[in-house]
Amino acid sequence: MTKFKMQTYQNLVKDSGGATRENLFSLLGKVQDEFGYVPREVVRDLASRTGLAEARIYGALTSYKDFKVTSQLDNQDERE
Amino acid sequence: MKENKILTRRVGRYQPLDIVAYKALGGLQGLKRALEIGPESIIEEIKKSGLTGRGGAGFPTGLKWASAAKVKQQPKYFICNADEGELGTFKDKVLLDGDPWLVLEGIIIAAYAIGAEQTYIYIKGEYEKTAELWENLVCEAEKANLLGERILGSSFSANLQVVRGRGPYIAGEEFALISSLEARRAMSKLKPPYPTEEGLFGKPTVVNNVETIANVPVILAETAEKYRKLGVEGDTGTRLFSLSGDVKKTGVYELEMGSGTLRELINELGQGTKNGRSIKAVQPGGGTSTLLGRDSLGCKLTSRAIRQAGSGIGTAGVIVYQEDRSAVDILKGLLKFYGAESCGRCAPCRIGVTKMKEIVDTLSRGEAAADDLAQLHEIGKACIVASTCGMGQAFPLPVLSALELFPEDFEAAITKNQKLK
């Protein structure tokens, strides 16, 4: 897990050949695996790239128990 | 009783990414023949083989393919369902990890037969290493010209996208899986239309289980005629039985259909129950299948025989419960799982599973009243009739059968309550 950087995310999109509705689910998965969560900025960016509403992506995300929408690293910092 | 390794014969015999070794062990013969005979003949072969879905519902594979193939519009999609979530079922993982090229070969043949250029494999979230392996496998396959443009010099091109599931059990259901791939909540929906008409992104889609797909190269390589000789009439081929629960030797056993009985599977291959006690009940087809009592253990391992005994072969996940378990505890465990996994789309399942879980929990605490049993029965019946998808229609089955087979366990739970009063 690495700290969220917009640049790292942009590279993930590039490596997946862009963001489309067809690869949205697996792309969200890659973001989750990389940062340990799917940041709000990413949801916003993916919404504009795919033409879907932000709420539509966020609503789907939060229904899966393996997707997180808050940083797991920050929580750890707080505990320490 | 002996295993008959057809699908699992190469498992563990080569390094998973090594295509040369796979070929040396007889791989790719099915795909070669498939490309020679063309889509229509492939579908005829699959129909003739009698192959049925191994994911639980048992639908004839050839028919499914034929209905997608006859739709002429593009794009079409093929999805390999590797979201193995049913309780007591872990057979697909053996193939995905142990002989991935066989599964991939099957995916390519299926895509070619129905005319799908985009294919997906949706791998259960917990199988993280398996998903990694498959990412690498796709790269190797592209290098070997098994995926990509003009596969093995033919005019057919196809891509495979590896997708990891993210948790929900229901994503293993056809429509819920499709909905998940569309980046929506994993939820089932009413059929028809079936996915072969309106599936992924509204396009014709075939969804097949891993084990089903692994049969395809075998059928093509050996011809349907020869394959049909395996098993019995109406139940051809082999099945991978996942044996778990109170048995000494849990594991996946590949058996020719009809080659033995439930008792033989448990006592010979499974080496009997854990502490030598007698068997109380068995679920022959995963966590949602009807419980069979001791009297049914002589039942042959075919879907027909298991159906006649009152249950279903489902995913062939055989769960064994030994004598010292109370039926109430068995149900408590099952309902804890299904209660958490109902997708919530339809009311009978969403409310029914919660209510049934509550009653069973009250029973197990010894706080239930006598009319709770009647209610448990009634809600179960209602769920079966009114639920949208297979999960809601099936999770009450073990409950209803437990009430019928082991009334003394429930009575004991209620008497305990009355004594407390």
Image (cartoon, rainbow, N blue to C red):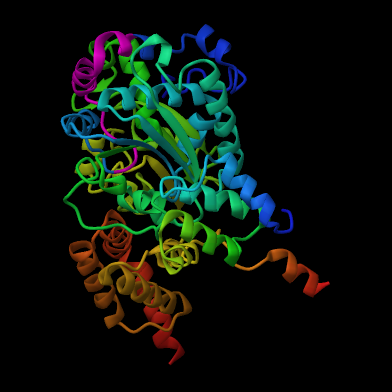
Q: Which residue lies furthest to the right in this view?
A: A80
Where does residue B346 sit, x and y in percent of width and height? 27, 68
Q: Nearer the viewer, residue B234 or A9?
A: A9
Measured along the vertical axis of the image, is residue B98 above or below residue B27?
below
Quadrant position of residue A4: bottom right
Q: Is residue B43 magenta?
A: yes
Measured along the vertical axis of the image, is residue B218 above or below residue B376?
above
Residue B397 visible in this rendered orientation of the protein = yes
Where does residue B142 sit, x and y in percent of width and height? 52, 21
- Point out the image quarter for the C terminus of chain B: bottom left
- Point out the image quarter for the N terminus of chain B: top left
User: How many numbered markers are drawn?
Assistant: 0
Magenta region, residue range: B33-56
Who's the residue at 39% across and 55% down the image? B170
Quadrant position of residue B260: top left
Q: Nearer the viewer, residue B132 or B27?
A: B132
Who's the residue at 66% across and 58% down the image? A36
Measured along the vertical axis of the image, is residue B39 above or below residue B389?
above
